[in-house]
Amino acid sequence: MMNDYLQNLNEGISVDCVIFGFDFDQLKVLLIQRESSNSINESQFSLPGDLIFNNENLDQAANRVLKELTGLENIFLEQIGAFGDLDRLSKKEDREWLESIRKQPDARVVTIAYYALVNIHSFDPKPSNFAKTVTWQPIDEIKTLAFDHMRILNQGRQYLQSKLKTQPIGFNLLPKKFTLSQLNKLYEVIIGKTLDKRNFRRKMINLKIVKKLDEKQEGVPHKPSSFYQFNKKNYDKLVKDGYDNFGF
Amino acid sequence: MMNDYLQNLNEGISVDCVIFGFDFDQLKVLLIQRESSNSINESQFSLPGDLIFNNENLDQAANRVLKELTGLENIFLEQIGAFGDLDRLSKKEDREWLESIRKQPDARVVTIAYYALVNIHSFDPKPSNFAKTVTWQPIDEIKTLAFDHMRILNQGRQYLQSKLKTQPIGFNLLPKKFTLSQLNKLYEVIIGKTLDKRNFRRKMINLKIVKKLDEKQEGVPHKPSSFYQFNKKNYDKLVKDGYDNFGF
DNA sequence: GCAAAAGTGTTAACTGTACACCCATGA
DNA sequence: TCATGGGTGTACAGTTAACACTTTTGC
């Protein structure tokens, strides 16, 4: 097993995962802290990621690594790009950690970045392998990350923003039942500006991607909101075809 | 030099380039045929691509490889994805060729795919290195390619189509001066359907990305068309921001 | 009754779409 | 004079954008 492991490990290629969640208030990202004996590294956060094996493809590697580090599985991961700058592993704090864990700490590693959207309330991440902690961090509070992970995170965010412009978003980030205000808020935090709620509602309803349920919020200190759910058929059609943007 | 070469070659990572051109009639793709001693491989076409060096980043590798195989340089290459399926090099014809050229023909290789749009008339590709021929092939006539290059080509095509929906296209594919019919045709071949020329013209003009020149076609057996050129400032702004698609 | 968020309609400007005929040129 | 592609306008439908007040609930 250990032999198999060493034989198949590809020391030149890794995967890293940018996992977004939404807590009805902010966009959050799943980060790990690595095990470390010295205190310098205590506060180092990074995206979940690791080297791939030579007997798995890239998608499989991303799923495996995410599961090994955070316990999350059955998540739809999408590739968002490869990162291969020569200095991507050369920060001092990162070098120390690499030396403690890698057989070839100086190897040049190209990483393939993946992205996913998940409902923060239906997954309970648990650290394992070299992850000491796994936490959801508000994206706007993340100032530094290990390696070039800040750059990868930014690419993930841009990817999400550009997706929003061409297809509906929300199915993977929200629970089955949600309110239109929650969906509205989600759109606002992704694009970073406020939206007119009347126009937003009208648009979602006209697109026929949400349908109203006979159920309302309870116990809220204001007029209770109706719950909605996505019309998966219409939603999926728009994910596939995109909005009819430019008249082509 | 040769030592340097061997020392720095990364046998696990390659780059492949999908270069699109437009001859006013069809979309074309730049393909190479590899040198080969046996006739089985005579007809094998592939995308220009090769292993990377460990002292260059991915973008540099793509530019170098493209230049080495086709002579093309100073081209804006964009990354479109990584391909790492386990069977991507296992077709019989490909194996034979790999054995003739690679030190480790069995190595697992992940490739990073790049994409570019170029003006077919301002570049004169010349085969070198292991490329025996370099040719522009009409995209619709390409039925098979080496390795998983057909898949990569399809991804490049999809990428181009989705770009067209969110930003203007044409600056890199057309000469400085062009007619609106040529631009119209370009859009038609990319999206694969005909467009109403009146609406198309109106849209391009309203977007302010083209401006009319005081110059007309000469020697054409029909009413000569005015030449246009792009307004680079407005064009670039739309490339950057995308069309204001969804009202967000 | 007050604070908090839900829910609702109208108008004006703009954009997309469908559609058909005359024009300038070379041969 | 004919074949070829260039060039133009209008009307209808649908979409976006801006904007403010009433409702329902818990406390």
Image: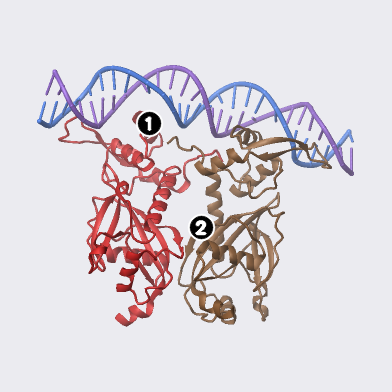
Chain colours: A red, B brown, C purple, D blue
Q: Is residue A186 above or below residue B90?
A: above
Residue sitting at 47 percent across and 41 percent down?
A243
Which quarter of the image is occupied by the N terminus of chain B?
bottom right
Q: In this view of the protein, can residue B68 be seen by the observer?
A: yes
- Helix, strand or loop at label 2? It is strand
Question: Where residue A162 appears, x then y in whole percent?
Answer: 44, 46
Which quarter of the image is occupied by the C terminus of chain B?
top left
State which quadrant residue A129 falls in. Answer: bottom left
Residue C12 vs residue A130: left or right? Answer: right
Dot 2 corresponds to which residue?
B80
> Residue A227 — which label?
none
Dot 1 corresponds to which residue?
A202
Same chain? Circles 1 and 2: no
C-beta proximity under 8 Å, tags 1 and 2: no
Residue C23 vs residue B136: left or right? Answer: right
- Helix, strand or loop at label 1? It is helix
Q: Nearer the viewer, residue A244 or A148?
A: A148
Name the kind of residue labelled 2 in the image: Ile
Give me the C-alpha separation between circle 1 and circle 2: 35 Å
State which quadrant residue A203 falls in. Answer: top left
Question: Where residue B44 appears, x then y in whole percent?
Answer: 64, 71
Q: Nearer the viewer, mark 1 or mark 2?
A: 2
What is the crowding at mark 2: few (fewer than 14 residues within 10 Å), some, or many (at least 20)? many
Name the kind of residue labelled 1 in the image: Arg
Residue B175 vs residue A100: left or right? Answer: right
Q: Chain of mark 2?
A: B
Residue sitting at 32 percent across and 82 percent down?
A3
Question: Where residue D11 appears, x then y in whole percent?
Answer: 60, 21
Q: Chain of mark 1?
A: A
